[in-house]
Amino acid sequence: MKRTALILLLALLPLLQINSQTFFGNEPFAHTYSIVAYDSATGDIGVAVQSHWFSVGTVVSWGEAGVGVVATQSFVNTSFGIRGLELLKKGFSPQQVVDQLIANDEGRDVRQLAVLDYKGNAAAYTGKKCIQSAGHIVGGGFSVQANMMLNDKVVPAMEHAFKNSKGKLAERLLATLEAAQNEGGDIRGKQSAALLVFRANPSGKVWEDKIVDLRVDDSAEPLIELKRLLKVHRAYEHMNNGDLAVEKNNMQKAMEEYSAAMQMFPDNLEMKYWTAVTLANNKRLDEALPFFKEVFAKDQNWKSLTGRLIPNGLLTVDETALKKILE
């Protein structure tokens, strides 16, 4: 914690009339703005957050496929994340979850909390001593909340942005954060951001249920970086879809997906290299060679890697073809 921030908080505590132990346990300070939301088209659920605090995503945003998402912020009670999800699993409504968590918390006056279940029902709470400008708006399938904002236009701007956005849920969540920042955002500035999206229904494979999991822990422009990462994420989705198409021997679909990825990041050598490998493995060497040549010209390490793929069966060409590739 920065010394100036600590001094400020110590000075504020008498004014807030709250015991210092409420804060100086393991609880971080995450004055911030966030959104929890539901995609009515897919059933996906997500949470996104931005703050002038280090690694805000590690404390504010929580979720689980087929259960719900939680944003716990202001003077954070981090336990609200896990406990909130557990209460949702037991059948409590988002409003009941909020009510129970807040009722049992001595620091309730400086907490801010939002809960959304897998059906899109939402509830939120803003403590009466949260630092202004602070508030929340709960709508159909979403809740937006903020505290310590530059002005009182931030939360309404978030509501408007989400309700009028289009596309996939992750992009809509990011657009909502951008709208908040455009209205002034956190009065202290910006430092970190995070974005989580979960599938509508659990698959039984937890590692597949989290669709998007992106964090920017420390940046002068966290939302710009988060937007860049989301674009990278989408490009690699195309690459993964291409790999799946190859497994099904659908080369037309594979090349469409690979092409989409490369169009998004034309300078990405990784994408070009594995596209070339796939082409070569499917006896389309003449199409693969220009990709190999371009990649090798920019980084000889890829050329060194190529021969190592043969023993593992990742590159299935004969010696003549390999020689052409490495020329």
Image (tube, rainbow, N blue to C red):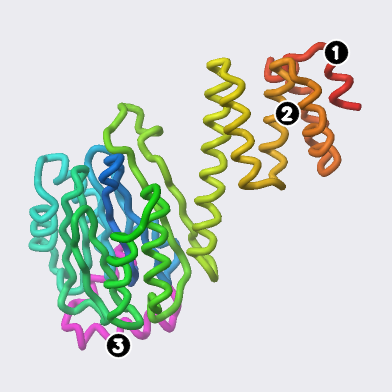
Q: Which residue is mark 1?
A: 319
Q: Rounded to the nearest whole Å, what is the CA distance between mark 1 and mark 3?
A: 74 Å
Q: Which residue is mark 3?
A: 11
Q: Rounded to the nearest whole Å, what is the CA distance between mark 2 and mark 3?
A: 62 Å
Q: Position of residue 139 (x, y in %)?
A: 19, 60
Q: Identify the image quadrant of residue 42.
A: top left
Q: Is residue 269 above or below residue 167?
A: above
Q: Rounded to the nearest whole Å, what is the CA distance between mark 1 and mark 2?
A: 17 Å
Residue segment shown in magenta: 1-29
Q: Which residue is mark 2?
A: 276
Q: Residue at x 28, y 56 (%)?
A: 36
Answer whether labels 1 and 3 touch (C-beta < 8 Å). Answer: no
- Dot 1 surroundings within 10 Å: few (below 14), some, or many (20 or more)? few
Q: Is residue 2 above or below residue 285?
A: below
Can you tell which of label 1 and label 2 is closer to the viewer? 2
Along the horizontal axis of the image, is 11 left or right of 122?
Answer: right
Q: Identify the image quadrant of residue 61.
A: bottom left
Q: Position of residue 206 (x, y in %)?
A: 35, 33
Q: Identify the image quadrant of residue 240.
A: top right
Question: Which quarter of the rendering shows the N terminus?
Answer: bottom left
Amino acid type of the residue that numbered disc 3 sits on in the rendered structure? Ala
Can you tell which of label 1 and label 3 is closer to the viewer? 1
Question: Which quarter of the rendering shows the C terminus?
Answer: top right
Q: Residue at x 26, y 61 (%)?
A: 72
Q: Secondary structure at mark 1?
A: helix
Q: Residue at x 8, y 53 (%)?
A: 96
